[in-house]
Amino acid sequence: MDQVYEYGRHYDDEAFGEKVWRVARILGRKGLVEALTLFYALKDPDTPARARGLILGTLGYFVFPFDALPDLVPFVGYTDDLALLGVCLGVVAMHVKEEHRHQAETTVREWLG
């Protein structure tokens, strides 16, 4: 997981917003909720620095198009992103608040109905 932190330099809010919106249907509800839950946890100043660093790296990996499985490969290119989102969420779970999940679920409901 230490290598994930290096991807944090590729993250910015605008790139995340554009990517998550663009691939919403590919990610599906579960993937979107995971990505947005991590996003809201990242934005929460109560989230500890170590957890924020891992989230930042994970979301940086998500927005970086040339990772282990390039996102240019339809559908298959997102399997590594989805796996990493799930692993990260599991690792930082104790720092994810119910409000983060609720915000993510509300956003996904607004986007996908």
Image (cartoon, helix red, strand yellow):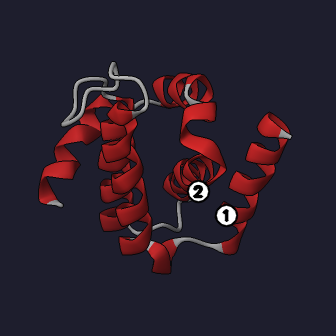
Cα separation, mark 2 vs mark 1, equals: 5 Å
The residue drawn where x is 38% and y is 58% is 52
Pinpoint residue 43: horizontal percent, then vertical percent: 55, 51
Along the viewing direction, whichever of 26 and 65 lies nearer the viewer? 26
Position in image of residue 55 (x %, y %): 38, 54
Task: Decide if residue 26 is on the left or right side of residue 107.
Answer: left
Point out the tag, 2 or 1, that comes first from the N-terminus.
Answer: 2
Image quadrant where residue 20 sits: top right
* In this picture, residue 86 sits left or right of residue 1: right
Q: What type is the residue that disc 1 sits on?
A: Arg
| Residue 67 vertical position relative to residue 85 in the rendered view, above or below | above
Q: Residue 101's mark?
A: 1
In which quadrant will I find the C terminus? top right
All told, the count of numbered labels is 2
In the depicted structure, whether residue 83 falls above or below residue 28: below
Q: Foreground residue, 51 or 22?
A: 22
Q: Which residue is mark 2?
A: 37
Name the residue located 49 percent from the left edge and 53 percent from the top edge.
42
Residue 10 placement: quadrant: top left
96 horizontally vs 62: left or right: right
Whether 38 is drawn above or below 68: the answer is below
* Residue 19, percent from left and from top: 51, 26
Callout 1: SS: helix
Quick one: label 2, few (<14), some, or many (20+) residues within 10 Å? many
What mark, if any, has residue 19 been given in the picture?
none
Q: Judging from the image, what secondary structure is the residue with disc 2 in?
A: helix
Q: Amino acid at mark 2?
A: Thr
Residues at discs 2 and 1 in contact (Cβ within 8 Å): yes
Where is residue 69 shown, x and y percent of the image? 24, 34
In the rendered image, the quadrant that contains the N terminus is bottom left
